[in-house]
Every structure is written in structure tokens, then in C-alpha cells.
């Protein structure tokens, strides 16, 4: 069975939507992610259903079949391994690699992916802190929470981001809040839910609620 790049992108979008909500992906949500019309989404869903890659009922949402889930997981695995390669081996910044990995993820060849994984030392997480599934589709998870959920006095380390946009990643770079940065939440301001934090190098700063919701912290 031949799968086009467009079909792969839809499978990945459905996977990520369902992963966040643990519910079937709705057409409008897929349309927003793919930045296309609902009519175009519906046409693609019919094609994917004909290939038994999704279960689709109009108005009830979409779920990946076992094969659809396998393909989506493999695609995400390739994408995140390429992101690691681009940052660790070619020196790209974490805000530069997404678009490049979007292109490289469609390169076919299981042997290539396996060698890439081995060359990189079988990384468990990508440069943004997202887990990388192994060759059998197993995911490495760690306990982490949005900064917005921490309480005053909590300590932790930045382990990931929810927002992968270049603008957000560049903003974190300006603040010196990349992965591995140590922080302590000093106080939360009730007025707008912004937070004051102290970093491990003894800098204090105030972060907006939006930033604190998009920054994952491992405590303990």
C-alpha cells in the first residue's frame, strides 16, 4: 500500500490531536492543524478510511486504526530523530529544526532510521523535550507538569515545551530558559496568574500565564 506525504501528514495530525484529548479527532480540529478547509479534510478522511488507516463516522470524529497508529508513530519517530540529529550533529538551534524535520521525516527506509537512531545513541527525547518512540513503538514518558500548576516554593527543571513555535522558543532563549534550566517558583500573582521565578543561576523574572502554561517542569 502506497501512502502519500499528504496522507502521512494527516495521520500525524490525527495522532497528535487524539493524544492531547484522548478522544476522537474532530474535523474542525484537523482542519485547524492542517490549515485547510473542512471540505478538504473530509475528502482526505474518506481516502484514509478506504485504506483502513482510520475509523471515520461523520460528526463523530476520527480514530486511527492499528495500522494508522503504527504509521503515525513511525513518522513521529523519524521527525524527532531528525530534530536530534540537526541540533546535536549539525548545530541547528531548537527553533530552526521543525521545518527541516518535516521534510526529512518523509524519507523512506527502515534501515536508515535504525542507523540514525543508533548513531545518535538511541535518544529518548527530542530537542523540545518530546518523547521519541523506539523501533517497536514504545514511548518513554517522564513525570512533568506545566509551570502554571506549580505552587510557591516548588523547585524543578525545564524538561519540555507545549508551544513549538519559533517565536516562543526564541523568547525562551532570550530568557535563558532552555531545557535543563533549574527554576524555583517564588510567587503567583492572582490578578493575571503570572508567576515570579528564580533560576538556578539566581536570576529572578516574571512570566506570563501563557508562558507558564507552555513550559513543562520536572519537580523533585
Image: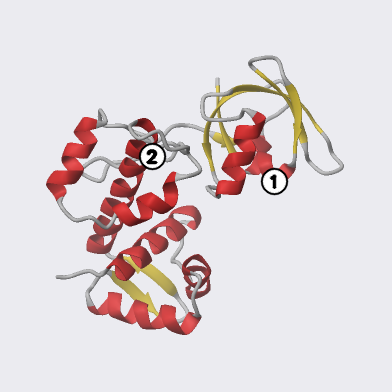
Residue 49 placement, left or right of 147: left
Q: Position of residue 82 (x, y in %)?
A: 32, 43
What residue sits 31% from the left and 70% below the top? 7
Please tell me the numbered disc located at residue 218.
none
Closer to the camera, 194 or 84? 84
Q: What's the residue at 75%, 28% (across, down)?
A: 205
Choose top left, top right, bottom left or bottom right for residue 119: top left
x, y percentage for residue 160?
A: 51, 36
- Circle 1 packing at 10 Å, graded few (<14), some (14-19), many (20+), is few
Secondary structure beneath label 1:
helix
Q: How is the protein colored in the picture?
A: secondary structure
State which quadrant residue 107 falls in.
Answer: bottom left
Question: For mark 1, what is the residue?
Answer: 210
Asked if disc 1 and disc 2 are in contact, CB closer than 8 Å, the reply is: no
Q: Nearer the viewer, residue 139 or 10?
A: 10
Quarter occupied by the C terminus: top right
Q: Is residue 4 above or below residue 151?
A: below
Looking at the rendered structure, the number of numbered marks drawn on it comes to 2
Q: Is residue 7 above or below residue 192?
A: below
Q: Earlier in the sequence, mark 1 or mark 2?
A: 2
Q: Which residue is label 2 attached to?
A: 131
The image quarter containing residue 83 is top left
Q: Nearer the viewer, residue 177 or 150?
A: 177
Give the position of the N terminus as an image quadrant.
bottom left
Of 182 and 51, the residue lying toward us = 182
Residue 188 position (above or below residue 107): above
Point out residue 174 in the picture as x, y percentages from the top left corner. Answer: 65, 33
Question: What is the secondary structure assignment of the residue under circle 2?
Answer: loop
Residue at horizontal 16 percent and vertical 38 percent from the top: 115
Q: Residues within 10 Å of mark 2 (few under 14, many from 20)?
A: many
Residue 190 lies left or right of residue 156; in this view the side is: right
User: Is 218 located above or below residue 208 in the figure?
Assistant: above
Amino acid at each position: 500500500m502506497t501512502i502519500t506525504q499528504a496522507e502521512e501528514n494527516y495521520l500525524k495530525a490525527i495522532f497528535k490531536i487524539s493524544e492531547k484529548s484522548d478522544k476522537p479527532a474532530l474535523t474542525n480540529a484537523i482542519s485547524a492543524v492542517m490549515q485547510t478547509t473542512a471540505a478538504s479534510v473530509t475528502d482526505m478522511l474518506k481516502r484514509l478510511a478506504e485504506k483502513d488507516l482510520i475509523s471515520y463516522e461523520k460528526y463523530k470524529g476520527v480514530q486511527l486504526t492499528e495500522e494508522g497508529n503504527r504509521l503515525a508513530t513511525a513518522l513521529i519517530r523519524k521527525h524527532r530523530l531528525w530534530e536530534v540529529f540537526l541540533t546535536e550533529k549539525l548545530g541547528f538551534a531548537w527553533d530552526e529544526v521543525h521545518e527541516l524535520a518535516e521534510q526529512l521525516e518523509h524519507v523512506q527506509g527502515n534501515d536508515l532510521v535504525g542507523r540514525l537512531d543508533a548513531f545518535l545513541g538511541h535518544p529518548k527525547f527530542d530537542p523540545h523535550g518530546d518523547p521519541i518512540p523506539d523501533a517497536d513503538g514504545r514511548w518513554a514518558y517522564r513525570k512533568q507538569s506545566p509551570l502554571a500548576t506549580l505552587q510557591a516554593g516548588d523547585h524543578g527543571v525545564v524538561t519540555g515545551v507545549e508551544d513549538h513555535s519559533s517565536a516562543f522558543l526564541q523568547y525562551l532563549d532570550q530568557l535563558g530558559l532552555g531545557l535543563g534550566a533549574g527554576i524555583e517558583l517564588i510567587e503567583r500573582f492572582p490578578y493575571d496568574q503570572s508567576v515570579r521565578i528564580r533560576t538556578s543561576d539566581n536570576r529572578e523574572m516574571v512570566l506570563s500565564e501563557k508562558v507558564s502554561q507552555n513550559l513543562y517542569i520536572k519537580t523533585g
